[in-house]
Image (spheres, rainbow, N blue to C red):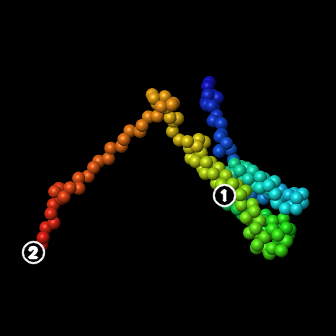
Amino acid sequence: MDDVSSTRTARRQTLWEQGRTPGRLVRAVTATVLLAIALIDVVAFGRLTWLFDITFVVACVAAALAVRPRDFFTVGVLPPLAMLVIVAVLAAFERTAVAEPGDGFVQATVSGLAHHAGALVVGYGLTLGILALRQVAAKHAGTIRTGARPTRSVAGPTQRVAPEPQVRPQQDWRPEHHEPARQVR
Protein backbone atom coordinates (compact mmCIF):
# COMPACT_ATOMS: atom_id res chain seq x y z
CA MET A 1 0.00 0.00 0.00
CA ASP A 2 1.51 3.32 -1.10
CA ASP A 3 1.48 6.20 1.27
CA VAL A 4 0.42 9.29 -0.66
CA SER A 5 2.14 11.66 1.74
CA SER A 6 5.50 9.93 1.27
CA THR A 7 5.45 10.48 -2.49
CA ARG A 8 4.80 14.17 -2.18
CA THR A 9 7.72 16.40 -1.58
CA ALA A 10 7.08 19.03 1.02
CA ARG A 11 7.75 22.48 -0.40
CA ARG A 12 10.15 24.38 1.76
CA GLN A 13 8.93 27.79 2.88
CA THR A 14 10.82 30.75 1.52
CA LEU A 15 12.09 33.57 3.70
CA TRP A 16 9.07 35.61 2.62
CA GLU A 17 6.61 33.00 3.92
CA GLN A 18 8.17 32.16 7.28
CA GLY A 19 6.82 34.99 9.44
CA ARG A 20 3.92 33.75 11.55
CA THR A 21 4.19 35.79 14.76
CA PRO A 22 1.13 37.81 15.83
CA GLY A 23 1.46 41.55 15.27
CA ARG A 24 0.85 42.41 18.91
CA LEU A 25 3.79 40.26 20.00
CA VAL A 26 6.05 41.65 17.26
CA ARG A 27 5.11 45.20 18.27
CA ALA A 28 5.75 44.51 21.97
CA VAL A 29 9.12 42.83 21.41
CA THR A 30 10.28 45.50 18.97
CA ALA A 31 9.28 48.32 21.31
CA THR A 32 10.98 46.60 24.26
CA VAL A 33 14.22 46.04 22.34
CA LEU A 34 14.29 49.62 21.05
CA LEU A 35 13.55 51.08 24.48
CA ALA A 36 16.24 48.91 26.10
CA ILE A 37 18.85 49.93 23.51
CA ALA A 38 17.83 53.59 23.87
CA LEU A 39 18.28 53.38 27.64
CA ILE A 40 21.64 51.61 27.30
CA ASP A 41 22.74 54.22 24.76
CA VAL A 42 21.71 57.12 27.02
CA VAL A 43 23.35 55.61 30.11
CA ALA A 44 26.58 54.73 28.29
CA PHE A 45 26.95 57.81 26.06
CA GLY A 46 24.52 60.40 27.42
CA ARG A 47 22.60 60.57 24.13
CA LEU A 48 21.24 58.42 21.31
CA THR A 49 24.08 57.34 19.02
CA TRP A 50 24.64 55.19 15.96
CA LEU A 51 24.11 52.13 18.19
CA PHE A 52 20.43 53.02 18.49
CA ASP A 53 20.19 53.81 14.77
CA ILE A 54 21.62 50.45 13.70
CA THR A 55 19.46 48.58 16.21
CA PHE A 56 16.42 50.49 14.96
CA VAL A 57 17.02 49.41 11.34
CA VAL A 58 17.69 45.78 12.32
CA ALA A 59 14.60 45.70 14.55
CA CYS A 60 12.45 47.07 11.72
CA VAL A 61 13.70 44.39 9.30
CA ALA A 62 13.25 41.64 11.89
CA ALA A 63 9.71 42.81 12.65
CA ALA A 64 8.79 42.84 8.95
CA LEU A 65 10.10 39.31 8.50
CA ALA A 66 8.57 37.91 11.69
CA VAL A 67 4.98 39.17 11.52
CA ARG A 68 2.17 37.07 10.08
CA PRO A 69 0.57 38.38 6.88
CA ARG A 70 -2.71 39.25 8.59
CA ASP A 71 -0.86 41.80 10.77
CA PHE A 72 1.18 43.57 8.08
CA PHE A 73 -0.49 46.89 8.88
CA THR A 74 0.68 46.76 12.50
CA VAL A 75 4.31 46.44 11.45
CA GLY A 76 3.84 48.80 8.50
CA VAL A 77 3.12 51.71 10.83
CA LEU A 78 5.51 50.60 13.58
CA PRO A 79 8.82 52.33 12.59
CA PRO A 80 7.70 55.97 12.62
CA LEU A 81 5.53 55.49 15.69
CA ALA A 82 8.29 53.67 17.58
CA MET A 83 10.82 56.37 16.74
CA LEU A 84 8.37 59.11 17.73
CA VAL A 85 7.52 57.47 21.07
CA ILE A 86 11.14 56.80 22.02
CA VAL A 87 12.28 60.31 21.09
CA ALA A 88 9.27 61.85 22.89
CA VAL A 89 9.94 59.81 26.06
CA LEU A 90 13.58 60.88 26.01
CA ALA A 91 12.56 64.49 25.33
CA ALA A 92 10.28 64.36 28.36
CA PHE A 93 12.66 62.70 30.82
CA GLU A 94 16.23 63.18 29.52
CA ARG A 95 16.08 66.10 27.11
CA THR A 96 19.84 66.31 26.56
CA ALA A 97 19.82 62.81 25.04
CA VAL A 98 18.04 64.12 21.92
CA ALA A 99 18.43 67.92 21.97
CA GLU A 100 20.06 70.93 23.58
CA PRO A 101 19.39 71.50 27.31
CA GLY A 102 17.43 74.73 26.70
CA ASP A 103 15.02 73.24 24.16
CA GLY A 104 11.38 72.71 25.05
CA PHE A 105 9.58 69.39 24.74
CA VAL A 106 8.29 69.92 21.19
CA GLN A 107 11.60 71.32 19.96
CA ALA A 108 13.50 68.44 21.58
CA THR A 109 11.16 65.89 19.96
CA VAL A 110 11.51 67.47 16.52
CA SER A 111 15.27 67.77 16.97
CA GLY A 112 15.57 64.13 18.03
CA LEU A 113 13.52 62.98 15.04
CA ALA A 114 15.64 65.11 12.72
CA HIS A 115 18.91 63.75 14.11
CA HIS A 116 17.76 60.16 13.59
CA ALA A 117 15.88 60.71 10.34
CA GLY A 118 18.39 58.62 8.39
CA ALA A 119 17.71 55.55 10.50
CA LEU A 120 13.98 56.23 10.31
CA VAL A 121 13.97 56.49 6.52
CA VAL A 122 16.12 53.37 6.04
CA GLY A 123 14.21 51.33 8.63
CA TYR A 124 10.81 52.40 7.33
CA GLY A 125 11.80 51.89 3.69
CA LEU A 126 13.13 48.40 4.36
CA THR A 127 10.05 47.53 6.39
CA LEU A 128 7.66 48.59 3.64
CA GLY A 129 9.78 46.93 0.96
CA ILE A 130 9.92 43.62 2.83
CA LEU A 131 6.20 43.71 3.54
CA ALA A 132 5.51 44.37 -0.15
CA LEU A 133 7.75 41.47 -1.20
CA ARG A 134 6.07 39.20 1.32
CA GLN A 135 2.66 40.23 -0.02
CA VAL A 136 3.73 39.37 -3.58
CA ALA A 137 5.21 36.07 -2.40
CA ALA A 138 1.99 35.20 -0.58
CA LYS A 139 0.05 35.64 -3.82
CA HIS A 140 2.52 33.57 -5.87
CA ALA A 141 3.18 30.55 -3.65
CA GLY A 142 6.37 31.85 -2.12
CA THR A 143 8.06 33.23 -5.21
CA ILE A 144 8.69 36.88 -5.89
CA ARG A 145 8.74 36.61 -9.68
CA THR A 146 5.99 34.93 -11.63
CA GLY A 147 6.38 32.81 -14.73
CA ALA A 148 9.21 30.71 -16.00
CA ARG A 149 12.76 31.87 -16.22
CA PRO A 150 13.60 33.56 -19.50
CA THR A 151 15.42 31.38 -21.99
CA ARG A 152 18.64 32.40 -23.66
CA SER A 153 18.36 33.85 -27.11
CA VAL A 154 20.16 32.42 -30.12
CA ALA A 155 22.32 35.53 -30.24
CA GLY A 156 24.12 34.56 -27.04
CA PRO A 157 24.76 36.47 -23.82
CA THR A 158 26.97 39.20 -25.32
CA GLN A 159 24.90 40.10 -28.35
CA ARG A 160 21.77 42.14 -28.05
CA VAL A 161 18.70 41.32 -30.00
CA ALA A 162 16.59 44.25 -31.10
CA PRO A 163 12.96 44.04 -30.04
CA GLU A 164 10.50 43.39 -32.80
CA PRO A 165 8.66 46.51 -33.88
CA GLN A 166 5.04 46.71 -32.94
CA VAL A 167 2.70 47.38 -35.81
CA ARG A 168 -0.12 49.72 -35.04
CA PRO A 169 -3.20 49.90 -37.20
CA GLN A 170 -3.35 53.29 -38.82
CA GLN A 171 -6.57 55.19 -39.07
CA ASP A 172 -7.36 57.01 -42.25
CA TRP A 173 -8.12 60.62 -41.41
CA ARG A 174 -7.96 62.07 -44.88
CA PRO A 175 -10.81 64.53 -45.49
CA GLU A 176 -11.99 62.84 -48.72
CA HIS A 177 -13.05 59.78 -46.72
CA HIS A 178 -15.43 61.73 -44.54
CA GLU A 179 -18.88 62.71 -45.64
CA PRO A 180 -19.55 66.42 -45.86
CA ALA A 181 -21.89 67.82 -43.29
CA ARG A 182 -25.47 68.16 -44.53
CA GLN A 183 -27.04 71.53 -44.43
CA VAL A 184 -30.57 71.76 -43.13
CA ARG A 185 -32.92 74.24 -44.96
Q: Is residue 59 visible?
A: no
Say what secondary structure mark 2 lies in: loop
Q: How far apart are marks 2 and 1 (CA)?
A: 70 Å
Residue sitting at x 81%, y 65%: 98
Of residues 62 and 125, which is closer to you in this image?
Answer: 125
Residue sitting at x 29%, y 48%: 169
Sort mark 2 into few (<14), some (14-19) or many (20+) by Cα contacts within 10 Å. few
Q: In which quarter of the image is residue 5?
A: top right
Q: Name the disc covering residue 115, or none.
A: none
Can you give x and y, in whole percent of width and height, for residue 125 in the image? Answer: 65, 54
The single residue placed furthest to the top in the displayed view is: 1
Which quadrant is the N terminus positioned in? top right
Say what secondary structure mark 1 lies in: helix
Sort mark 1 into few (<14), some (14-19) or many (20+) by Cα contacts within 10 Å. many
Of residues 137 and 4, which is closer to you in this image?
Answer: 137
Residue under label 2:
185
Can you give x and y, in whole percent of width and height, for residue 19 in the image? Answer: 69, 47
Residue sitting at x 17%, y 56%: 177
Mark 2 vs mark 1: in front: 2
Q: Which amino acid does label 1 sit on?
A: Gly
Tell me if 175 is positioned left or right of 71 in this view: left
Residue under label 1:
76
Q: Which amino acid does label 2 sit on?
A: Arg
Which quadrant is the C terminus positioned in? bottom left
Of residues 105 and 9, which is closer to you in this image?
Answer: 105
Can you give x and y, in whole percent of width and height, for residue 122 in the image? Answer: 69, 54
Residue sitting at x 83%, y 74%: 102
The single residue placed furthest to the left in the displayed view is: 185
